Image (tube, coloured by chain):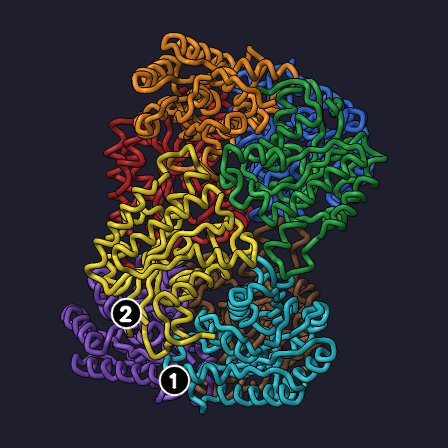
Chain colours: A yellow, B green, C orange, D blue, E red, F brown, G cyan, H purple
Amino acid sequence: MLFENGDRIVFTGDSTTDADRGRPVGEGLWAGTGTGYVRQIENILNVVYPDKLFWISNTGCGGNTSLDLRNRWQNDVMNLNPDWVSVMIGINDIWRRFDSPAIRSLHVYAAEYKQNLSEMMERTLPVVKGMVLLSPYYIESNREDSMRQATDEYVAICSEIAKKYNTVFVNVQQAFDEYLVYRHSSYVAWDRVHPGPVGSAIIAREFLKAVGMDRSYI
Amino acid sequence: MLFENGDRIVFTGDSTTDADRGRPVGEGLWAGTGTGYVRQIENILNVVYPDKLFWISNTGCGGNTSLDLRNRWQNDVMNLNPDWVSVMIGINDIWRRFDSPAIRSLHVYAAEYKQNLSEMMERTLPVVKGMVLLSPYYIESNREDSMRQATDEYVAICSEIAKKYNTVFVNVQQAFDEYLVYRHSSYVAWDRVHPGPVGSAIIAREFLKAVGMDRSYI
Amino acid sequence: MLFENGDRIVFTGDSTTDADRGRPVGEGLWAGTGTGYVRQIENILNVVYPDKLFWISNTGCGGNTSLDLRNRWQNDVMNLNPDWVSVMIGINDIWRRFDSPAIRSLHVYAAEYKQNLSEMMERTLPVVKGMVLLSPYYIESNREDSMRQATDEYVAICSEIAKKYNTVFVNVQQAFDEYLVYRHSSYVAWDRVHPGPVGSAIIAREFLKAVGMDRSYI
Amino acid sequence: MLFENGDRIVFTGDSTTDADRGRPVGEGLWAGTGTGYVRQIENILNVVYPDKLFWISNTGCGGNTSLDLRNRWQNDVMNLNPDWVSVMIGINDIWRRFDSPAIRSLHVYAAEYKQNLSEMMERTLPVVKGMVLLSPYYIESNREDSMRQATDEYVAICSEIAKKYNTVFVNVQQAFDEYLVYRHSSYVAWDRVHPGPVGSAIIAREFLKAVGMDRSYI
Amino acid sequence: MLFENGDRIVFTGDSTTDADRGRPVGEGLWAGTGTGYVRQIENILNVVYPDKLFWISNTGCGGNTSLDLRNRWQNDVMNLNPDWVSVMIGINDIWRRFDSPAIRSLHVYAAEYKQNLSEMMERTLPVVKGMVLLSPYYIESNREDSMRQATDEYVAICSEIAKKYNTVFVNVQQAFDEYLVYRHSSYVAWDRVHPGPVGSAIIAREFLKAVGMDRSYI
Amino acid sequence: MLFENGDRIVFTGDSTTDADRGRPVGEGLWAGTGTGYVRQIENILNVVYPDKLFWISNTGCGGNTSLDLRNRWQNDVMNLNPDWVSVMIGINDIWRRFDSPAIRSLHVYAAEYKQNLSEMMERTLPVVKGMVLLSPYYIESNREDSMRQATDEYVAICSEIAKKYNTVFVNVQQAFDEYLVYRHSSYVAWDRVHPGPVGSAIIAREFLKAVGMDRSYI
Amino acid sequence: MLFENGDRIVFTGDSTTDADRGRPVGEGLWAGTGTGYVRQIENILNVVYPDKLFWISNTGCGGNTSLDLRNRWQNDVMNLNPDWVSVMIGINDIWRRFDSPAIRSLHVYAAEYKQNLSEMMERTLPVVKGMVLLSPYYIESNREDSMRQATDEYVAICSEIAKKYNTVFVNVQQAFDEYLVYRHSSYVAWDRVHPGPVGSAIIAREFLKAVGMDRSYI
Amino acid sequence: MLFENGDRIVFTGDSTTDADRGRPVGEGLWAGTGTGYVRQIENILNVVYPDKLFWISNTGCGGNTSLDLRNRWQNDVMNLNPDWVSVMIGINDIWRRFDSPAIRSLHVYAAEYKQNLSEMMERTLPVVKGMVLLSPYYIESNREDSMRQATDEYVAICSEIAKKYNTVFVNVQQAFDEYLVYRHSSYVAWDRVHPGPVGSAIIAREFLKAVGMDRSYI
C-alpha cells in the first residue's frame, strides 16, 4: 500500500469530503473527520491495519469550488505538512451553472478548473510523498444530461491532470456508473451529488483500491 | 372561471401541497396555506378577483402516498364540506420503490394507486361542485429514466381517472417537461420532486389555466 | 421589456424588500432573494422568460430609513455593478415620527428624504442602464390619517424625483388604494406596512407592468 | 371602591387580557397575571391599598372570540368561585371578518355576540358580587373605517348588555378615542388591537376609575 | 413639573434600572426601556401628558457598581446629550461585601462610592437641566441587619451628595420602608433587591412625585 | 450509624430536596439525586463507607407544600419500599402566606401542617426501619421577622412530631442560625430559602451527625 | 451467504445497536438504521450485493437490559415478521451491578439473563429463517477486571444458548480482544462499552463473516 | 492549616478542575468555581471556617495539556496575584497518546511534561506563599494497563517535582487506588478520567488533608 506507518494524509475538497467534519482541522475523536467517505476510509484502515498509524485530517468545506479551494490551499493543506494529499473538487464549479444559471459570479469554467487543479499539484507535489486525485461525479446514468456531460468534461480534465503529474487517480464517476446499473440514482443521493452512507462506502472502496490496500476488510 | 364567489376549495396531497401549511387545517393568516403552489394560487386569485371570496384550505401532508391520503380522506377532506377539491398525489407511491427498494411496506403499485384515486373520486364527487386532479411529476427530462417511466405510468392513470369521472385534469408533468427544454432539472428542484418557488409558480399557473381563470394577473 | 438577457438587477430598500433575504447579498437558491415581492418578481420572470437569464440580487435591510440606505449605498448597490437598480424606501423615515414621536434621532423629514433619493440617483444613473423607483406606501384608505398624509407627501417626492431623473416610477400607494376599495387594510397587513403574500403579489404586479413585461403569466 | 378586602377578581377575555399570563390560571408571582392591563391594575391596587388583599386571577386566552370564551366559561370562570368577574371580549369576533373574509367559520356576528355576552351574564351574576364589562375597541380614529364601524356596533351591544344586567361598563373605545386626539394609532398599537404598555396603562386607568377607586396613585 | 416638552431624560444605574432594556441604548418601541420602573414612568407620563413628548432613554446595566457606571459614564450618559439624567446606583457596591465576602475585587466601599457619585455630578451638571438621584435600597425592614445598615450609610451619602449639588433626591429606601409596614419583604422581592412589578410601581411613584408631576393618573 | 449495608433511603420534600433530581425517581448516575444536600450526603457516605451500599433515592418536588407531599406520598414514598425515609417539608406552606398573601388556595396553616406530618408518620413508620424529619428553615437571623416567626412555629411542630413518633429530628433552622453569626444570609441564599452549595453542605452535615455517622470525612 | 434476496433482517438490542436509529422502527433513508454497526452492515451489503435487496430494520433501545428487551419483544421483533433476527444484549444487565451497585432494581443476574435469552429464542425461532446472537462485550483486555469477568460469564451463556438453539453466534468480545493487542481500549471507546465508528466497523466485520458473506468489499 | 484568613487560592488545570466554571475567572456566586472538586473544597472550607475568608478562583480549562496550561500561565495564574496556587495537570498529555495515537501534535511526552511543570514552579514560587501539586490519575486498578503505566510515570514526575521545589503534593492516584479496592472504576468514572461527584469528593478530601485542615467537617 502507498501509505506507510506514521503518514499524515490530508483529505480536502467540498461538502462530500467535509461531511460535517470538525473545525478548524477535522481529525481525532468525535466530530473529527466527519461522517462521509473520509470517516469510512479511516474506519477500514484502522480495523485492517491496527499495527500501523495513519494521521488522517479532513479540511473539506461545503460549497467550495476549485477556486475557493485554491484560495485556502496554503492554510488548509500546505501548513499541515502532509505526507499525502487527497483532493476531490469540481462539482460546485459545474452545478452552479445549472442550478443558478444567472449568478455568473458562482460559475467556474473548465479552463479555470484545469488551471486551479494544476496549481494545487505544482505547489504540493514537491513537498509530499504523493497525491490522490478523486474525480468529481454526478450520480446520473443518462450521459445526455447536460450537467452529466459537463461533469464528464471535468472528469476528463482530472484524469489528464493526474496523468500529467503522475498522481493516483480515482474515477469516482465510473464507480457510480457501475452501481447505477443496479440501483436508481435516488437510492444513492436524492440530489445526485451528496451521497448517503452507501454512496460514501462506494467512494471509500474506490479510494482504498487505488492506494493499493493489501489486506482485506471483508 | 369554475370557482364562484364564496366557494370553499380544499387542496390536498403530499409534501408539494403541504409546503409547511398550518395544522390541523391550513388556512387563513400566517402559517395558513403554506409556502408552495397553494399559496401562490391564493395570492393570484385574491389580487385578480378582489371582489370575490374563495375559502382556500390546505390539508396536504408531507410523505403521503395515495394510501395514506385515502386513509385520512374523511377527516381531512370530506369533513371540511368543500365546494371544490384539488388533489395531487402519487410521487411517494413511486419514489419509495426507487430510493428504498427493500422496504416493501412503503411501496404503492399502479393498480392500488388507481384504486385509491377511484375511491377518492367516488366518495367526493357526489357532494362537491367538482374536483381538480393534478398529476404527479418527476422533474427529469430523460424519458428512459426508470423512475420517470413509472411516473409516466401514474400520470396516465391520473389522466384516465380524470376522464372517467369527468373532472378537471392538470398535467403537471407536461408543464415541467416544457420548462426543462430551457432549464436544467437542478434549477427547478435538486431532488427532482420538491420544487422551489419557481417550480411552484409553474404548477400554480397550470392550475389557474385549467380552472378557466378569466382575468389576467400579468 | 426593459430588462435584457443577462442583466443584473439589484433590488434594495427596507424590510418590505428584505423579507428575510440571504446575507450578505440575497441571491441564488434557498434563502436567496427572500420571501417578499422580489421573490415573486423572480418567480414570474423565470416562468415566463425561461429563455432569458436575469441575475436578481436583493440588498434590502429591515428598519432602514433613506439615511441608512444612503450610508450603505456604495457597498450594497454600487459595488455589485448592477445593470438595473430598483429601490423602495421611505416608510421608516415617516413611521418613526408617528410611533416614536419623542425619539427625534429616528426621524427623517421630507427635505432630507428628497436629498437622499437625489444622491442615490446621481451616484447610480451614470453607471447603470436604468433605475426603478417604487414609492413608499401606507395601506390605509383614509386620506385624512396623519401618517397617510405624510406618506402622500413622500410619494409625491418620489414621483418628482423619478420625473426629474427620468427613471421608471412605480406608484405602489396607488395600487394599494385601488385594492382597498375591495378589502380592508387588515387583510393586506395588520400593521398597514408589512404586506403578507397577497400584498407582495400586488407590488410585484405593479413592478412588472412598469418595466414593460411583454408576455403574460396568467 | 367596589372591591372589598379579600375579594377574588377574575379577569378574562382574549389576547389583550391574556398578555402571556401563567397557565392554567394566571395568578401569583412571576408569570402570574401576564404583562398587560391586568398586571398594571394589580400593581396599582397593591401600591395604593397595601392594607387590603385582592386575589387577582387572569384566564384570558389569545385569539378567543366570544364563542370560544363562552365554551370555556364554566372551567375558566365559574369554577374559580370569583367575587368579581371582569370580561373584555369581541374584537376577534370582528377582526376575522376583515382579515380573513373568506374563512366564514371564524366569524362571529353581532347577534351571536350579544347572545354570548348575555349567557355569560346570566350564568355568572347570580353567584358573584358583580361583573365589569369592558368594551372591545379598535385603535382607529377614523369612524368611517369599516372595521371601526363594526367595532362601534359591538361596543354598543356591550353598553346595552351592561345596562340591561346593571353591571359596571368600561368604554375602552372611548378612552382610546380621546387619546388618539394627541397620538397616532401606530404609537399605541401597530395593528390597532394589541396595545403596548402605554395602551395597557390607558385600559387600566379606565378600569380603576370605573370600579370607583378612592385613593390616588399619582 | 420639572420636565418640559421635548426633554431627553436618560435613566441609568444597575439591574433595577436595566430590567432587560434594549441595547445599545434602551428607547423606543418593544425592548425599549425594559420592564422595570423606567417603563412604568414612561407609561404614566405618556398617558397623562399626551400633549407633551419626553424622550426617555435607559442605559442601566445589570450587576454594575458605582465604579462600573463611572467607567462608562461618557459613553452611556454624556454622549447622549440628555436634558435630564436620573441615576440609581450603589446596591452592588454593598451586596458583594455580603454575598461574596472573600472576593475583594468586587467590593466598593463608602468613600469610593461617594467619590464616584461626586464625579458623575460634576461632569454632568454643567451641561444638563438637572439630575435626579435615586437612593439605593434594601427591601428589609430590620434596621439591625448588617446589609441594611450598610445600605443606610450609602443612602445617607446619596442624600448628602444630592444636597451638596442641589439635585432632586428620591429616597427609595424610605418608600419601601413605608410599604414594609403592610407587606413582607418577600412579597416585593424574594432577594430584597430586584423588585417585581409592584416594587417597580413604588419606585416609579416616588420618582414622579419628586419631579413634581402636576396631573394625576388615578 | 443508623443506616445498615443495603438500606434504601428515600429523601423527599420540596425544592431544596429536589435540586433538579432525575424523574420519576431520582437515583443512580448523572441526574440521579440532584445537586443539593441529598447529593452531598450520598457523596460523603460513599467516600467514607465504600464497603457498604446505601440505595439513595430522591423524590423531592419543587414548590411542594406539605399538602402536595401528602397527596403523592403513596406513589413517591410508600411504593418505593424504603428502609428509611427522610423528609423536609413546610417552607412553602409558610412562604405563600407572605409572598402571595391574597392567593389563599396556596396557604397551608399550622394545624393542617401538623396533621399532614402526622399522617405521613403514621402511614410510614410501621413499615420502615425509621424516619428522619428535617425542620423547615428560613435563613434569616432576625427572629422578629414575621416569616421567621412563622417558620419557628413550624419548626416547633416538627420537633414535637418527631418526639411524639420517636423519629430522628434534624433542626436545620438551628444549624443555619449558628452559621448566620458569621455570614450574612445573602451569602447562603439570596432568597433565604434556596441554599447554594455551601448551604447544602450545612444541611448535609447536620443530617449525617443526626444519623450517627461513625467515621469522619475530614 | 445466509441472507437471501428480499429477506427482512431485524437488528435489536441496546444502545450499541440503537445508535440514534429512527423511531418507531429504524429503517429506510436518513435517520433510518442509525450510525452504528447496523448502518455499516447495511452499507457493505448494499455496495457488495447491489443485485439483491435486504430489508434491514433496527429496533435497538439505549439502556436496555435483557429484561427490557424481553418485555418489548412482541412489539419490536415479532410484529415486524422478520426473516432473520439479530440480537446483541446483556452489557446493561452487567454494568449496573458495577456503576450503580446499590440500585438493586437495575441489576439482571446471569440466571435471569439466560432465561431471557432462551425465551427470545423459543418465541422466535419457529417463525424465522434464523437468528444471529452477538455476544455482549467489555472493551477491556484485563481479564482480572471484575466487570470483564462478569462479561465473560455472560458471553459464555450466549455461546451456550447459541449452541443449544443452533443459531449463528458472533463472539464480539473475542474480536475486541484481538484488537486490543494493538490499540488501547480508550481508542475504541472511552467508556469501554459504546464504540466509536472504528469499533462499529469491527462488530460489522465479525457479523458479516459469521453470516457467510461470500463477496469481498476490500 | 496552610491557608490563612484572606488568602487568594487559584486552582488551575484541565477539565477535572474546570468542571464548567465561570469565565473568564471562575469565582463568586453561581457558575463560579464549577461543579467539581474545587467547588467541594470551597464548600467544606466555608462550612468549617466561617470565621475566615478564602478567595477561591478556578481557571481550569477542559482538554488542556501541560503545554496548553504553560502557554496561558501568565494570564490565568500570575496575573491574578494569588497567595496559593493549586495545579492538577497531565492526563491529557497522556490520554491522547492512547485514544489518538496517530495525531502526534496532541501528545506531550514525559520530558516535556516535566519541563512544563518545572517552569510553572519557577515562575510562581517566588511570588506566592506556596503551591499545591495534585498528581494526574487514571481510575484503573490494573497496573499493567499501558495508560495506567504511563500515568504512574507522570505521577512520579509530579512527586519528584514537588519534592525538588518543596511544595505540597497530593497523590490523587493513590487515593483512587485505595478506593478501587471497594468499588469498580465504572462507579467513579465511566471513562476512568472525569469523576462524578463521589470522585470529586475523594479529590477534595485528599487536598484538604494535604493542606493541613485542622477542624473536622464530619
- Quick one: label 2, few (<14), some, or many (20+) residues within 10 Å? some
Question: Which secondary structure lies at badge 1?
Answer: loop
Q: Which mark is residue A24?
A: none
- Name the spot of residue G125 as percent of width and height, x first: 71, 80
Of C56 and B10, nearer the camera is C56
Which residue is farthest right? B126
Q: Which residue is mark 1?
A: G181
Where is residue D83? Give x, y as percent: 73, 41
Label 2: chain letter: A
Q: Chain of mark 1?
A: G
Give how far apart the Cα atoms at labels 1 and 2 are.
21 Å
Amino acid on which disc 1 is placed: Val
The part of the image, by quadrant, that contains residue B18 is top right
Question: Which residue position is annotated with label 2?
Answer: A7
**Which of the two residues, C65 or H60, is positioned nearer the viewer here?**
C65
Describe the element under mark 2 as helix, strand or loop. loop
Residue drawn at (30%, 69%), measured in percent from left and top? A2
Q: Does residue H19 appear left or right of residue G110 in this picture?
A: left
Amino acid type at mark 2: Asp
